[in-house]
Amino acid sequence: MLASRIQRRAFSASARNLSKVAVLGAAGGIGQPLSLLLKLNPKVSDLALYDIRGGPGVAADLSHINTKSTVKGYEASASGLAACVKGADVVLIPAGVPRKPGMTRDDLFNTNASIVRDLAKAVAESAPEAKLLIISNPVNSTVPICAEVFKARGVYNPKTLFGVTTLDVVRASRFVSEIKKTDPKDENITVVGGHSGVTIVPLFSQSNHPDLSSNAELVKRVQFGGDEVVQAKDGAGSATLSMAMAGARMADSLLRAAAGEKGVVEPTFVDSPLYKDQGIDFFSSKVELGPGGVEKILPLGKIDAKEEKLVEACLGDLKKNIEKGVAFVAQNP
Ligand code: NAD
Ligand code: LMR
């Protein structure tokens, strides 16, 4: 009697830890290593992969890795996409084109806006409760696009939509450790705002090294770190491996919070009250994650005068990027 009760309890606990995770754009430069890292994550029980080309091949390859999760690749069709996302707890979207040297992220808008809109429609229809993580650029606009798509279908939940800005945090931590000769794991740098150029605002005054907020070169390196990779790849794309790591970290944080872990905090671009009074509906700041996604959006806290100026510069561009996404869906529903 007692044994069966214990068994039942153990079963229901593990059932809560079963998570279907879908990757849309899974055969791409980010999609492949991201899917690999998710295959290695014991909290993922079902890995569902979709791409307009190559999804089943990537899935067959990953399915030979001897971790517990199942891996399935879906055919490139509306029904394949719907089946891929159905029942997913977490959906990551790294589908879309990357930058070439000389381009801004905003230059990707014309191509990526409709890709993300169409994938968001499928998620809104087949997995409206999933936590949706947007990697495709320009994140400042693609996240509002998803929100508009969900609103139009009456299924928008601001607590489950995330722009992935984790790479900015990862970079800031690494760059600081290079300067200070420390272990990057001890360097937690909060980065707020958005995910492009001056909308990326590192808050070094809140770190172990408050003096770094005066290091204009470092601030610029965090804001334009993506350009370094774009230039080094010389036309072959942008960050893929570091982004896969960052995306896998964000997904893992959400899965840990969903499993009941407390105190999981990540900076991420969400529907936020922080600057709504200035007409800015989305903003990245530290967010405490919980079983339902966003548990609590943390305020910026104390920042110094230099950072105040950076935030001011961020808000103008961010507002325009958000408005562009909203207008796109209004004109191209
Ligand atoms: P990539 O070209 O290597 O891969 C993109 C993949 O998306 C391809 O496999 C392609 O077939 C697929 N795809 C295109 N349209 C699709 C659709 N409608 N449905 C499903 N799949 C589709 O590009 P990448 O290097 O992986 O970058 C992808 C995106 O991620 C780019 O927009 C890039 O700017 C962005 N990115 C964001 C961050 C960030 O920090 N948020 C970091 C790096 C890159
Ligand atoms: C990055 O920050 O590396 C990405 O947003 C890709 C890019 O275009 O720089």
Image (cartoon, grey):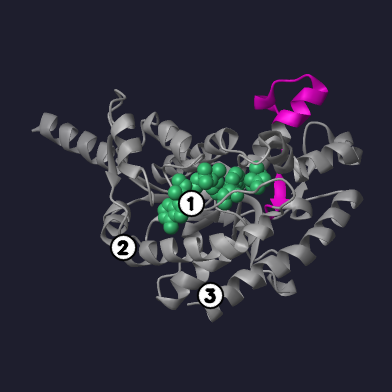
Disc assigned to residue 198 = none
> Mark 2 or mark 1, which is nearer the start of the sequence?
1
Q: Which residue lies under the disc numbered 2?
A: 126
Residue 331 visible (yes or no):
yes
Q: Secondary structure at mark 3?
A: helix
CB within 8 Å, label 1 to label 3? no
Q: On the picture, is 77 further left or further right than 308?
A: left
Task: Give 100 or 203, whichever is nearer the viewer.
Answer: 100
Q: Amino acid at mark 2?
A: Ser
Q: Name the residue that disc number 1 marks.
A: 95
Q: Residue at x 61, y 42 (%)?
A: 237
Looking at the rendered structure, the secondary structure element under dot 1 is loop
Give me the residue at 76% from left, 44% from top: 224
In the displayed structure image, the side of residue 52 where residue 8 appears, left or right: left
Q: Is residue 224 magenta?
A: no
Tag 1: amino acid: Ala
> Relative to the observer, which residue lies in front, 243 or 298?
243
Say which residue label 3 marks.
329
- Relative to 9, say whether 320 is above or below: below
Secondary structure type for disc 2 = helix
The outermost residue toward the front is 235
Q: Name the amino acid, label 3.
A: Val
Ligand 1 within 8 Å of disc 1? The answer is yes
